[in-house]
């Protein structure tokens, strides 16, 4: 997963390609050993897990992408961990990972790709990837650092934490010029300070309705604008332009690929067929079944978080929903640690309990 985030041509680095292939074989085997041997389950639970495992394997085999199968196995492996431990690991790992990649880019070992962006008819802005596949990927990891800070420092939240988030915003907006993550950082700051200082005890009630509304609104907005775009609606065309042609691309992709229950082999070989919208990506690439399953699991995850009155995590779940309108990173565990909340429904009932009193 991490290799796909770098500006590396695997065919030019044969040793890295072989190592990448080796890991793609070893990791699923290790996950299965962890699930079946190290953490044995009761037969009833194991049977449920096997049904889901078989489903994700069939989908992965059909669409030619085993990332979703590996993600499912990884989710099953975190039994016994709480979200605070996961967030700490992700924060430390992300900081080290970003530092190493940027340094390798600075030394020329990894390419620092240039991505021009036209601002009007004459103005040209050059965006740099700093060793990552593109500036948006780099911004995704920086955004995850911001989310980890919100979750870990919620109880001690102060002006220092606000400053750190604003510093990340400055880097993302000024150096990467990632408008999506810049807007999300602002939304994150507004929600955090609103719930922490203004709403206080009423924040869970506000977030309950806002989160459930967002769960319906984000995919609905994505597909409704596609329908309007298909009917040459000027508002939908304007929205598509503002969203860097995400709606246009989703429209062409939905017409190019057959809608399948178990997904399609997805080729990013044409600009019009590159689907960055997460909901459209899941629907086309992984199929209708996984799309429905994802939305249902997200609904259950929101209700679980409300039950434990975990305000910071509920904020993160909500903000990532809006992230899905523009990017597909929300379904990748290496760029969205909140996806591990799904384990609470299968094998890890204590994922949020240890944080309950600290996050109220």
Image: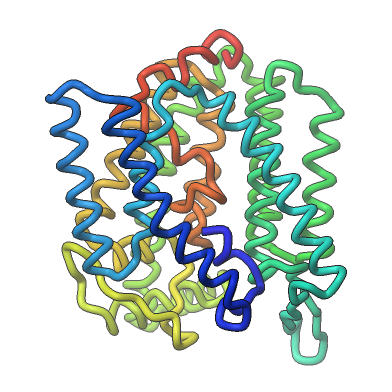
User: Residue 251, how many percent across, how many down?
Assistant: 36, 78
Q: Is residue 114 left or right of residue 263?
A: right
Depicted 65 relative to depicted 213: above or below: below
Drawn side of residue 91 relative to residue 213, left or right:
right
Q: Nearer the viewer, residue 83 or 31?
A: 31
Percent coordinates x, y for residue 183 in the rendering = 67, 53
Q: Is residue 205 above or below residue 73?
A: above
Q: Residue 33's x, y, as percent?
A: 32, 38
User: Which residue lies at the image location 56% right of the left edge and 82% below the top edge?
Assistant: 11
Q: Quadrant of residue 174?
A: bottom right
Residue 8 in which image quadrant: bottom right
Q: Quadrant of the C terminus?
A: top right
State the scheme by which the image is colored: rainbow
Query: Left of 25 or right of it: where is 4?
Result: right
On the rendered structure, is 88 left or right of 63?
Answer: right
Q: Residue at x 57, y 58 (%)?
A: 2
Number of callouts: 0
Q: Is residue 151 above or below residue 256?
A: above
- Extreme-bottom residue of the structure: 122
The structure residue drawn at horizontal position 39% and vertical position 26%, both measured from the top left corner, is 79
Q: Nearer the viewer, residue 253 or 8?
A: 8
Residue at figure coordinates x 46%, y 14% from the top left: 353
The image quadrant that residue 181 belongs to is bottom right
Q: Position of residue 208 (x, y in %)?
A: 44, 27
| 254 relative to 74, above or below | below
Q: Nearer the viewer, residue 109 or 105?
A: 109
């Amino acid at each position: 997963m991490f290799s796909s985030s770098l500006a590396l041509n695997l065919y030019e680095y044969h040793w890295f390609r072989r190592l990448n292939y080796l890991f793609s074989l070893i990791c699923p085997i290790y996950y299965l050993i962890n699930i079946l041997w190290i953490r044995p389950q009761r037969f009833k639970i194991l049977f449920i897990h096997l049904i889901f495992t078989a489903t994700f394997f069939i989908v992965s085999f059909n669409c030619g992408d085993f990332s979703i199968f590996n993600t499912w196995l990884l989710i099953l492996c975190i039994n016994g961990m709480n979200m605070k431990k996961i967030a700490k690991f992700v924060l430390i790992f992300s900081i080290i990972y970003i530092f190493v990649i940027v340094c390798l880019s600075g030394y020329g070992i990894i390419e620092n790709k240039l991505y021009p962006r036209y601002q009007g008819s004459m103005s040209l802005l050059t965006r740099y990837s700093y060793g990552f596949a593109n500036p948006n990927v780099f911004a995704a990891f920086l955004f995850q650092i911001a989310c980890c800070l919100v979750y870990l420092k919620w109880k001690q939240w102060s002006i220092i934490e606000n400053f750190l988030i604003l510093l990340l915003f400055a880097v993302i907006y000024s150096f990467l010029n990632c408008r999506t993550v810049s807007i999300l950082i602002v939304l994150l700051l507004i929600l955090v300070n609103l719930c922490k200082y203004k709403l206080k005890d009423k924040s869970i009630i506000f977030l309950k309705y806002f989160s459930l509304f967002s769960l319906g609104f984000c995919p609905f907005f994505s597909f409704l604008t596609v329908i309007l775009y298909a009917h040459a609606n000027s508002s939908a065309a304007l929205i598509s332009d503002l969203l860097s042609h995400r709606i246009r691309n989703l429209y062409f992709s939905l017409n190019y690929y057959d809608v399948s229950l178990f997904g399609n082999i997805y080729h990013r070989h044409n600009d019009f067929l590159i689907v960055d919208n997460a909901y459209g990506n899941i629907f086309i690439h992984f199929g209708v079944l996984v799309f429905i399953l994802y939305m249902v699991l997200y609904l259950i995850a929101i209700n679980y978080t409300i039950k434990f009155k975990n305000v910071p995590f509920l904020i993160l779940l909500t903000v990532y929903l809006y992230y899905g309108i523009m990017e597909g990173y929300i379904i990748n565990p290496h760029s969205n640690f909140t996806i591990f909340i799904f384990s609470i429904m299968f094998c890890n009932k204590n994922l949020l309990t240890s944080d309950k009193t600290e996050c109220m």
